[in-house]
Image: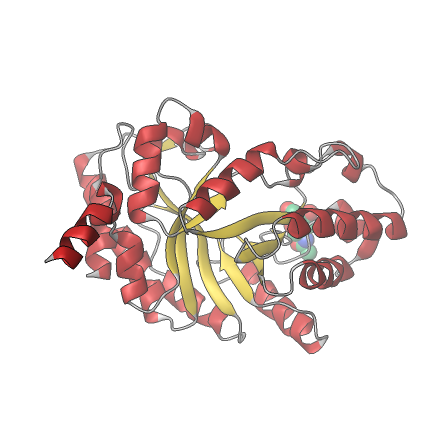
Amino acid sequence: MKFSSTLLFMLTPAMVMGLLDQKMKAKGKRYFGTALDAWHLSGSDQSNIKMIAGADFGAITHENSLKWDAVQPQQGNYQFGNADAVVNWATSNNRLLRGHTLVWHSQLPQWVHNINSASQLTQVIQNHINTVMGRYRGRIYAWDVVNEVFEENGTFRNSVFYRLLGENFIDIAFRAARNADPNAKLYINDYNLDGPGPKIDAMIALIGRLRSRGVPIDGVGTQAHLILGQVGGVQSQLQRLAGTGLDVAITELDIRIQTPVTAQKLDQQYSDYQTVTRACLNVPRCVGISVWGISDKHSWVDSTFPSYDAPLLWDDWFNRKNAYWGVDNALN
Ligand SMILES: *[C@@H]1O[C@H](CO)[C@@H](O)[C@H](O)[C@H]1NC(C)=O
């Protein structure tokens, strides 16, 4: 049995444990992924993070280090150190990468907010996309080309992009993106697309217009920053997004719990994660799910929603939560 003993020797502990991504692929999907940044890979929790990311996740999204303020804080001054660290880790560990994000009104440096000429802004968008996507050409599987363009009422957000260029800023961004890396999957991404209402209606209508104008777009990402007990609409809205003819992905999943966190709420979280995972499995165009981090200890929820907590699959001490087993159960 030389072959199998050699094979066993080659399997790292992480691969032996490797579960969620493997199970997701066995269901015909591309990946089960997570978000992280360079500091996760170098900080005091790095061994837990690398072990878990290696074991359960087949796709990595930069949580912050590919955003505009991180990579081009001043015009023409590109800073890729942190983004490179994530790309290098993911690539050397054979993970897919989702690039997040190119054109977004938030975490956008002041020099871009200050632009007041449409032609200058067009060039700035094109240069940013060419430079950032070009650097990683062939290594990032999918990009969130534009992020969060809509208000909750379905009108376009009053960003510098929309003020100077109207809806056309989206066309400009996607055309530049296709040009910069022709093989990358190009996504539009937003949150609160998990229930019916004017926002998802506006998204579906926009996708229709983009497609009729021949804008190169491949997918729509629904972030799915959810609240415990409010996940029942996910599958039907995912189905509506898939009805546009694009791929769909759940890109930033977390399910936050209003404090105090109780055992009963953590049980509910098992069932909510199971429901969301099944939603992707039940929608053929859903290519994958990414959760927005590994441990509750590092979630953005703590600072952004102080009265909520515990949104992820591992607790503050890197123990698997009931939520993890909810995903696992849906995938079995
Ligand atoms: C939509 O919402 C935005 C942000 O709250 C607001 O500024 C705008 O006036 C609203 N538009 C309509 C038509 O209600």
Please state the horizontal and vertical placement of residue 9, each as a whole percent of the image.
Answer: 19, 46
Is there any visible trace of residue 312 in the rendered image?
Answer: no
Q: Name the residue rendered at 30%, 40% in the picture.
A: 52
As rendered, which of 176 and 105 lies closer to the eye?
A: 176
Q: Is residue 150 above or below residue 64?
A: below
Foreground residue among 313 and 7 = 7
Q: Is residue 144 visible?
A: yes
Q: Is residue 64 left or right of residue 159?
A: left
Question: What residue is at 72 percent from the left and 64 percent from the top?
Answer: 175
Q: Nearer the viewer, residue 189 or 129?
A: 129
Question: Residue at image x 54%, y 65%?
Answer: 219
Instruction: Residue 49: name its quadrant.
Output: top left
- Which of the two residues, 271 or 288, is positioned nearer the viewer here? 288
Residue 184: percent from left, percent from top:
58, 61
Along the horizontal axis of the image, is 228 left or right of 201?
Answer: left
Left or right placement of residue 102 versus residue 241 in this view: right
On screen, residue 3 above or below 41:
below
